[in-house]
Structures are given as C-alpha cells and as structure tokens.
Amino acid sequence: MNGPPRFQRGERVLIRAGRQVMAGEVLLASGNGQSIAVGYDGMVAGCVNVLPLLWDPGSGTFRTIVNQEAIGVQKVTH
C-alpha cells in the first residue's frame, strides 16, 4: 500500500467527507505526511473551520482525530 500524499503548508485542497465537498487550505503538515490540519469555512465531520487529520495506512486515507471519519484530501492544481 502507498504511503500518505505529501502536503505543504499553504496548499489549496478539496476536502471530501461523504457527499460533502469543501475547499480548504493546509494549515499544518508533518514532515512524514502522517498528519495534517486543514482550514476551511464551515463544518466538516463535526469540526468547525479546522480539521485535524491522521493518515490511516489500513484504509489508505486520512481520518479525523475527533471521530475517525474517513476524509478525502486532494490538492487543487489550478
């Protein structure tokens, strides 16, 4: 299985939680890619404005620290 995607502070991203899709920005990113915090305007997965995430190698996705919900994070390239 592949490791986590690498993000850098300040990168624009799309956050996907179930059917919800929201634009955000990486606020913090660990050097090893295992954890990130994403900022956005609104509520995602029970978190308001900041979403702390840890990489789950078993599922190959990020999960919220708050409730372990799987969250997709994709870089915005344009």
Image (cartoon, helix red, strand yellow):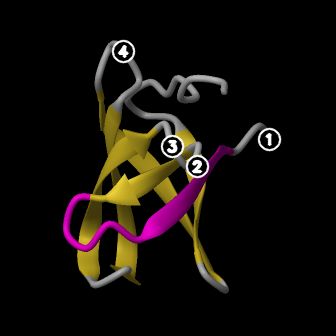
In the rendered structure, which amino acid carries the disc numbered 4?
Asn
Circle 4 crowding by C-alpha within 10 Å: few under 14, some 14–19, many from 20: few
Say which mark, if any, is on residue 78: 1
Instruction: Work out how far the residue at label 4 is from the one at label 3, CA to CA, in angstroms.
Output: 17 Å
Which badge, 3 or 1, is on the more N-terminal residue?
3
Name of the residue lying farthest toward the front: 58
Q: As displayed, is residue 62 above or below residue 67?
A: above
Q: Amino acid at mark 3?
A: Gly
Residue type beneath disc 1: His
Is 68 part of what is drawn in magenta?
yes
Quadrant assignment for the C terminus: top right
What label sits on residue 32 in the rendered view?
4
Question: Which quadrant is the N terminus positioned in?
Answer: top right
Among the 4 quarters of the image, the one containing residue 16: bottom right
| Numbered badge on residue 13 | 2
x, y percentage for residue 3? 56, 23
Closer to the camera in the image, 74 or 69:
69
Q: Mark 1 or 4 closer to N-term? A: 4
Identify the mark nearer the N-term, 1 or 2: 2
Q: Residue at x 49, y 36 (%)?
A: 57
Which residue is disc 3 drawn over?
58
Q: Is residue 56 above or below residue 67?
A: above
User: Hey, which residue is sitting farthest top in the picture?
Assistant: 31
Mark nearest the camera among 2 and 4 is 4
Mark 2 Cα within 10 Å, few/some/many (few <14, many 20+)? many
- Nearer the N terminus, badge 3 or badge 2? 2
Q: Is residue 20 above or below residue 6?
A: below
Instruction: Report the magenta residues as a range.
Output: 65-75
Q: Which of the pair 75/6 is nearer the observer?
A: 6
